[in-house]
Amino acid sequence: MLVTDWGEINSQDTLYRTAKNVEEATKLALQQTSVDMSMVADDASFGQTMLDLVANGTLSEERLDESVARVLQLKKDLGLFTDPFADPQLATTVGSQQDVNAARDAVRESVTLLKNENNVLPLKVNDKVLFIGPTLDSTRLMGGGWNVHWQGPSNEDGDAVYQGFGDTILRGVRQVTGKAPKYMQGVDIDGEALIDIDNVVRAASKADKVVVGLGEHTYAENGGNIGQLLLPEKHIELVSAIANQTNTPIVVVLVQGRPRGLGTIAQNAAAILNAYLPGAYGGLPIAELLYGRVSPSGRLPTTYPATEAQASATIWQSSYGEYAPQWAFGYGLGYSNITYSNVTLSHSDLQMGAPVTVSVTVTNHGPHVQKEVV
């Protein structure tokens, strides 16, 4: 069966203006497409209008029969006529250890190290580290939108909405190091205000290293529309204040659903780790990556733009256009020295139906165990 996206039948009238009213929108959808269901939960106009169209002879009952048959067939195929309710025991699998392990493994293999000057990472357990930033002490911010709610958990929901499931980066650090991390918020997630900045800078100056967790509030679809690509101004100011007033190396962890512009962070941070949206159980694996329990092996799935003009760049750029992104598609670092050698082809002629096999020797010179994307 075919179902629309949310409210898209009526959107022909209200949004796209391809129909003069809801009646015409419904008629177009049913007469010119094979759509079976209108996805909408707070408007009954589709069903009533459809019945009106049948009653006045505009729409045939046979057209309704086609969609009804497909809906009923799907329900039959799913077994809903013989067993309409799910097995209650399935609820016991929520948060199962195998699912938690799978979620954490996905984070270990996807987080991307974008910068690591002077091997500031990995951190050492005996380093005196100050942790700063809203994304380090939040489960909900690691999940983004379509996470509990459409737009993700609200500020009022907080992390309590997870009912004990999930973790945070700070809790992961505690688990890896065996001690409570020193933490200061420094800035709110929306970047509206710096928080206790003088004391933050003072504490940063006494630390061996500083880890700053930045990113975005939760969002989905239109709720995430932004006017500019840059991270919130106060996020950038926080890193600048530490960089300008201390000599402490700065590690930035980005928790974000898209490559936000970094401004001066790209220069001020000694190391940058892009965690994307790692999910509710992302805290421990990110801590493992920070402390070298795992060496980063993720690679950028898109180009990371340096300017807003490059925002549409993914893999291809025209030869006559300047190509100077912040980081290119496929870029990513690890903690080990990996070299490639002995690249060979099975044959040098490229012909239809004759695959070419490429062989390469990849050598890990240490000092870490390393997964490598070739």
Image (cartoon, rainbow, N blue to C red):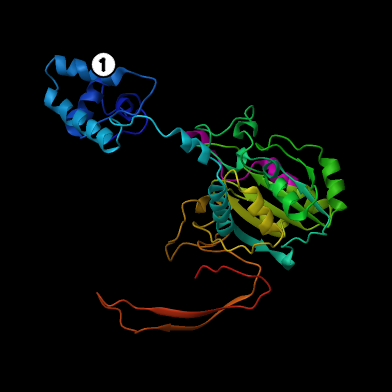
Q: Which residue is mark 1?
A: 48
Residue 272 shows up from this direction: yes
Looking at the rendered image, the quarter that the N terminus falls into is: top left
Left/right of residue 351 with respect to residue 294 in the rendered view: left
Residue 159: x and y, percent? 64, 34
Q: Where does the magenta region start and end?
A: 221-238
Q: Residue at x 26, y 16 (%)?
A: 48
Which is nearer the eye, 287 or 308? Answer: 287
Residue 86: x and y, percent? 40, 33
Residue 228: x and y, percent? 56, 42
Estimate how packed mark 1 is, as few (under 14), some (14 to 19) or many (20 or more) residues with alpha carbons within 10 Å: few
Q: Is 233 in the magenta?
A: yes
User: Is 337 drawn above or below residue 136 in the view shown?
Assistant: below
Which is nearer the eye, 7 or 175? Answer: 175
Q: Is 72 in the magenta?
A: no
User: Is 332 drawn above or below residue 362 in the view shown?
Assistant: above
Dividing the picture into quadrants, the one containing residue 152 is top right
Dividing the picture into quadrants, the one containing residue 273 is bottom right
Which is nearer the eye, 328 or 151? Answer: 151
Q: Residue at x 67, y 57 (%)?
A: 288
